[in-house]
């Protein structure tokens, strides 16, 4: 409480200072997009893309008590319009408009908030005067939101989720450049049809694969397969394409989803308590992602509790807590015999998203397995 109270005047000071930079929030109007890989600032005014920047909170909207507070600060306090105003360079590359949808730490995202955000993005993407969307977001769960959007939006227009690891008040703050880069990527026609992207630390990642790997470093976001590209000196440079179906290529449509089934994640460790499985079943989970050791291994004392859960109709999905690699079906466990599913390469928090979406389509375990192998 005390800490929050101390931060507020400082954040307010910062905000009023950034407001003085005076970015005009242009009304969106139809405009041809900038050419692929064009350096920033070289495109004519008439060719600027129209980008909506949706604010949801996180560190990119954070403020600390001192410039040396790079990792201890208050997140989700700066309104999106003020974040935009603090990066006047953005107005040289796009017509931007801010919209505050949430002001939360991303750990507070739940299914309802995820659906609300995705529906709003979907609505905006249908507008002919919107060329792309940037979402400012806390980094804790950016990967879950990006994966959900990647699977459920029905548009080729670029959608870029961006965050920062340091608040705008910190020495070495990374939010301004990340936001500038995100707008650059969203404005670039080369970003069309690549699914939902995540931009931080000069890199463009696919929403499917990216994950946060470090609690405080700016190079925290990684994919086991590397980034799709870089953003450098105002240029968007792609080197790879996403291989798995996304957005317009999937069977999931956010406009038709109003609720997601409950899917629990249970983390495995030595001497784990089987009561976690019972608790998930009792809470009404339709599926359990068992975040197992190694290649989806299941301790001998955990096999029966998982089989019992399956007997009650709860789907069991074996994932790996290693963070990468493929869980082999019928490898460490006889999945055919137990009627279990494997995640392919998806980490538990993304497997939860995919399973919840998959359960809106089918209850057939074979079809559910195919969905994991497909997406
Ligand atoms: N609580 C975190 C969140 O909103 C702040 C961390 C961050 O955004 O980097 O996700």
Image: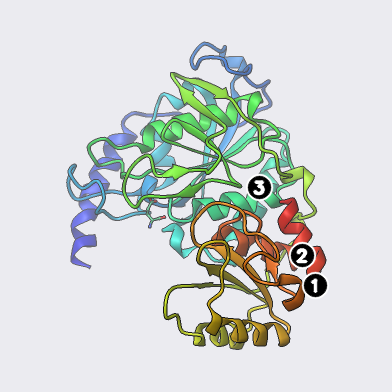
Residue 350, position as x, y percentages in the image: 59, 58
Can residue 254 be seen from the camera position used here? Answer: no
- Mark nearest the camera among 2 and 3 is 2
Residue 88, labelled with which disc?
Answer: none
Precedes in sequence: disc 2 or disc 1? 1
Near-viewer residue (283 or 78): 283
Q: Secondary structure at mark 3?
A: helix
Q: Which residue is mark 2?
A: 368
Near-viewer residue (359 or 178): 359
Residue 363, labelled with which disc?
Answer: 1
- Between the C-alphas of marks 2 and 1, the distance is 7 Å
Q: Is the residue 106 above or below the residue 303 in the image?
A: above
Task: Name which residue lies at 54% across and 23% down.
Answer: 236
Task: Name which residue lies at 51% across and 83% down.
Answer: 276
Can residue 288 be seen from the camera position used here? Answer: yes
Quarter of the render that holds ligand 1: bottom left
Q: Is residue 10 left or right of residue 213?
A: left
Tell me where residue 163 sits by quadrant: top left
- Mark nearest the camera among 1 and 3 is 1
Task: Name which residue lies at 57% across and 61% down.
Answer: 295
Tell me where residue 285 sits by quadrant: bottom right
Q: Secondary structure at mark 2?
A: helix
Residue 239, position as x, y percentages in the image: 59, 25
- Between the C-alphas of marks 2 and 3, the distance is 18 Å
Residue 150, labelled with which disc?
Answer: 3
- Between the C-alphas of marks 1 and 3, the distance is 22 Å
Q: Is residue 199 left or right of residue 130?
A: left
Residue 272, position as x, y percentages in the image: 45, 80
Q: Is the residue 263 above or below the residue 55 in the image?
A: below
Q: Are marks 2 and 3 in contact (CB under 8 Å)?
A: no
């Amino acid at each position: 409480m005390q800490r929050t109270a101390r931060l507020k005047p400082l954040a307010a000071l910062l905000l009023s200072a950034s407001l003085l930079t005076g970015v005009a929030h242009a009304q969106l109007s139809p405009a041809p997009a900038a050419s692929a890989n064009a350096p920033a600032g070289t495109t004519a005014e008439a060719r600027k893309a129209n980008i909506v920047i949706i604010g949801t909170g996180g560190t990119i909207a954070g403020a600390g008590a001192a410039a040396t507070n790079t990792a201890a600060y208050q997140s989700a306090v700066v309104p999106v319009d003020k974040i935009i105003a603090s990066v006047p360079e953005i107005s040289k590359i796009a017509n931007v408009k801010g919209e505050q949808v949430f002001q939360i730490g991303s750990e507070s995202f739940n299914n309802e908030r995820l659906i609300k955000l995705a529906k709003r993005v979907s609505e905006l993407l249908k507008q002919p005067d919107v060329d792309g969307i940037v979402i400012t977001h806390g980094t804790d769960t950016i990967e879950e939101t990006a994966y959900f959007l990647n699977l459920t939006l029905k548009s080729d227009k670029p959608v870029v989720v961006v965050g920062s690891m340091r608040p705008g008040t910190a020495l070495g703050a990374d939010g301004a450049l990340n936001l500038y880069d995100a707008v650059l990527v969203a404005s670039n026609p080369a970003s069309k049809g690549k699914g939902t992207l995540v931009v931080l630390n000069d890199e463009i990642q696919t929403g499917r694969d990216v994950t946060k790997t470090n609690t405080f470093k700016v190079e925290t976001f990684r994919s086991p397969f590397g980034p799709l590209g870089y953003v450098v000196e105002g240029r968007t440079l792609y080197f790879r394409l996403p291989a798995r179906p996304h957005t317009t290529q999937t069977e999931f449509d956010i406009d038709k989803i109003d609720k997601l089934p409950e899917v629990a994640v249970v983390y495995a460790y030595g001497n784990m308590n089987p009561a976690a499985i019972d608790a998930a079943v009792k809470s009404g989970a339709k599926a359990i992602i068992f975040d197992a050791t190694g290649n989806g291994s299941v301790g001998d004392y955990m096999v029966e509790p998982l089989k019992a859960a399956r007997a009650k109709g709860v789907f069991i999905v074996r994932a790996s807590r290693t963070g990468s690699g493929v869980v082999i079906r019928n490898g460490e466990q006889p999945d055919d015999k137990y009627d279990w599913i494997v995640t392919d390469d998806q980490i538990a928090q993304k497997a939860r998203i995919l399973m919840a979406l998959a359960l809106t389509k089918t209850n057939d375990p074979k079809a559910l397995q195919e969905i994991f192998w497909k997406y």
